[in-house]
Image: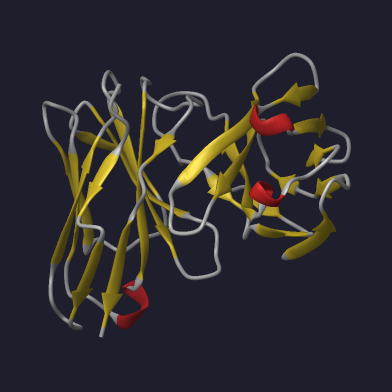
Amino acid sequence: AQSVTQLDSQVPVFEEAPVELRCNYSSSVSVYLFWYVQYPNQGLQLLLKYLSGSTLVKGINGFEAEFNKSQTSFHLRKPSVHISDTAEYFCAVWAMYSGGGADGLTFGKGTHLIIQP
Amino acid sequence: ETGVTQSPTHLIKTRGQQVTLRCSSQSGHNTVSWYQQALGQGPQFIFQYYREEENGRGNFPPRFSGLQFPNYSSELNVNALELDDSALYLCASSISGTGGPYEQYFGPGTRLTVT
């Protein structure tokens, strides 16, 4: 089984400041990694994903994340945030099982990013 | 290109009743997954359907069941509703065979309240 830990339930940041949202995972098999954003009263939107290759992945809206296998982390960063970035951010993993079947995405509990003017 | 749509938007049911939630997949997608998101929590995987068959299931009891139709739309049925079933139910569609990890596109969700 796999699990995802988002270390901060809330992160307040001033507008135009940098931000890092932390995500650690545990799994007995290799995983693919994702970050999703959820705006109030909406579904989830994919920000970025790591499947293979370069450990630094860039996503939409200026976000990027770095996969660190030794630390089992996938932290999300943005160099300068805007008021419109206020939302809930979810880290998720998909376990690579051989054969058929699916366990879906395993999500963390989310981090509420609060942008202060 | 039409995205994932879900109906209804909101629903209020009484404990013990049954409910059916509906989802239309994004055009060209053949796989649908359902998730339950309780207030203040991340989504939890309920099950996934591919080629009209369930091919993966999370830790949910059998009173949670589903269907996928030939046009790839889907239903989530919940029998004998309990208060803890109150949540946002998210549908996600993707292009895949068995397994993954293909990008999942989420709908806006159905907010179910059980009283």
x%, y% of residue B71? 13, 26
Counting every numbered tag in the picture gives 0
Identify the residue at horizontal 24%, vertical 61% (top origin).
B62
Relative to B63, does residue A48 appear above or below in the rendering?
above
Relative to A50, does residue B7 appear above or below in the rendering?
below
x%, y% of residue A77? 81, 39
Identify the residue at horizontal 35%, vertical 43% (top origin).
B107
A58 to the left or right of B7: right
x%, y% of residue A30? 67, 30
Identify the residue at horizontal 64%, vertical 48% (top origin).
A84
Whether residue A96 is visible to the viewer of this picture, yes or no, is yes
Identify the residue at horizontal 29%, vertical 28% (top origin).
B26
Residue in front for this viewpoint, B31 or A13: A13
Relative to A112, does residue B108 appear above or below in the rendering?
above
A6 to the left or right of B55: right
A117 to the left or right of A98: right
x%, y% of residue B115? 25, 85
Residue in front for this viewpoint, B97 or A60: A60
